């Protein structure tokens, strides 16, 4: 089970920190990711991180503005959002899969088995 928190309403240029807490999984052997879905659009990849937190990969649209991190002792993965733009407005979902290797970088939503309920991020212009 994954539970996200930290969404909210922020002005353009602002920052937010999203958090996802996992339970019922072997967290330190799961690739983790954040996806987002804007109204009327398909869910899209934002960021992913490998088992140990030593490698991360970002969508071009968020690279340089978002940072993903994980704490395997706390079973949490976070996404730091900065330089937010109105087009970042979306529901942000945390995802996990144990069908991965230690260095897996997985960017396709179909590669993930467990999803959170999502947290809304709204950026005002």
Image (cartoon, helix red, strand yellow):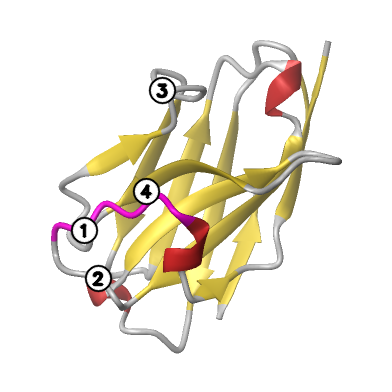
Tell me the magenta residue range: 103-108
Q: Which sits in the foreground, 37 or 79?
A: 37
Alpha carbon separation for disc pair 1 and 2: 6 Å
Q: Are marks 1 and 2 in contact (CB under 8 Å)?
A: yes
Label 3 and label 1: CA atoms lie apart by: 19 Å
In x, y percent, where is residue 55? 19, 44
Residue 64 shown left or right of residue 39 in the figure: left
Tell me the element at label 1. Answer: loop
| Closer mark to the observer between disc 2 and disc 3 | 2
Instruction: Using the image, tell me which numbered label, if any, was put on residue 8.
Output: none
Q: Quadrant of residue 15?
A: top right
* Cα separation between marks 3 and 4: 12 Å
- What is the spatial separation of the Cα atoms under label 4 and label 1, in whole angstroms? 9 Å
Per the image, is 57 magenta? Answer: no
* Real-space CA distance between mark 2 and mark 4, rounded to the nearest whole angstrom: 12 Å
Q: Which residue is mark 1?
A: 104
Label located before the other in sequence (3 or 4): 4
Of badges 2 and 4, nearer the viewer stands 2
In this view, 19 is above or below 60: below
Residue for badge 2 = 100
Which residue is label 3 attached to?
63
Q: Is residue 69 left or right of residue 109?
A: left
Q: Percent from the top left, x then y, of residue 69?
A: 34, 46
User: Above or below — where is 82 with respect to 8?
Assistant: above
């Amino acid at each position: 089970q994954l539970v996200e928190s930290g969404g909210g309403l922020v002005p353009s240029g602002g920052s937010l920190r999203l958090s996802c807490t996992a339970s019922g999984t072997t967290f330190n052997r799961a690739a983790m990711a954040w996806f987002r879905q804007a109204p009327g659009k398909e869910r899209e990849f934002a960021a992913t991180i490998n088992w140990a937190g030593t490698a991360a990969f970002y969508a071009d649209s968020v690279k340089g503005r978002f940072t993903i991190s994980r704490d395997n002792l706390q079973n949490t993965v976070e996404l730091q959002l900065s330089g937010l733009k109105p087009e970042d407005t979306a529901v942000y979902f945390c995802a996990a899969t144990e069908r991965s290797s230690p260095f897996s970088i997985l960017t396709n939503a179909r590669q993930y088995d467990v999803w959170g309920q999502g947290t809304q991020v709204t950026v005002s212009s």
